[in-house]
Amino acid sequence: AFARGGRLAVFGALLAQRVAGINTRTGQPLEVVAAIAPRPLLLVTGGRDAVVPPAVAHRLYRVAGEPKHLLRIERAGHGHYAE
């Protein structure tokens, strides 16, 4: 998802994960989200997301620690939230 922003965006995302102690290469998404608590988490999902369907986003939200917020943009696909 970060690849569309170019190498700098990918680097920034990977650096943020490393600083936070998150290893997304070895963990499953549910485990990774559960492990980042008690950091604040904002999950953004699109109602038309075929990559991470809304049902999966809701499962991620349920396992996340507090504080957390789920923002669903009904007409958006994966990564097209601004549109």
Image (tube, grey):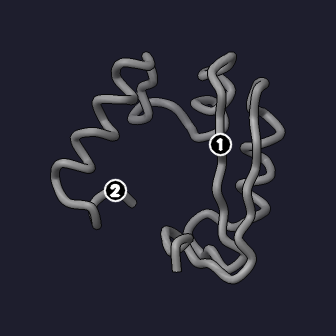
Q: Is residue 17 left or right of residue 64?
A: left
Question: How far across and down, in percent of the image, does residue 48 sit?
Answer: 67, 80
Relative vertical location of residue 82 with respect to residue 66 in this rendering, above or below: below
- Which residue has dot 2 on it? 2
For disc 1, the marked residue is: 42
Figure check: 8 above or below 65: below
Occupied quadrant, residue 76: bottom right
Q: Residue at x 76, y 42 (%)?
A: 69
Residue 3 coordinates in the image, percent (x, y) = 27, 60
Q: Is residue 11 left or right of residue 14?
A: left
Q: Position of residue 61 (x, y in %)?
A: 77, 43
Q: Identify residue type, mark 2.
A: Phe
14 w.r.t. 37: above or below: below
Q: Nearer the viewer, residue 47 or 82?
A: 82
* Residue type beneath disc 1: Leu
Q: What residue sits 63% from the left and 30% below the top? A: 31
Horizontal and vertical percent position of residue 47: 72, 75
For the view shown, which residue lies furthest in the right direction?
Answer: 62
Quadrant containing the N terminus in the rendered view? bottom left
Disc 2 versus disc 1: distance between alpha carbons? 16 Å
Which residue is at the front of the view, 5 or 50?
A: 5
Residue at image x 80%, y 52%?
58
Q: Which mark is residue 77?
A: none
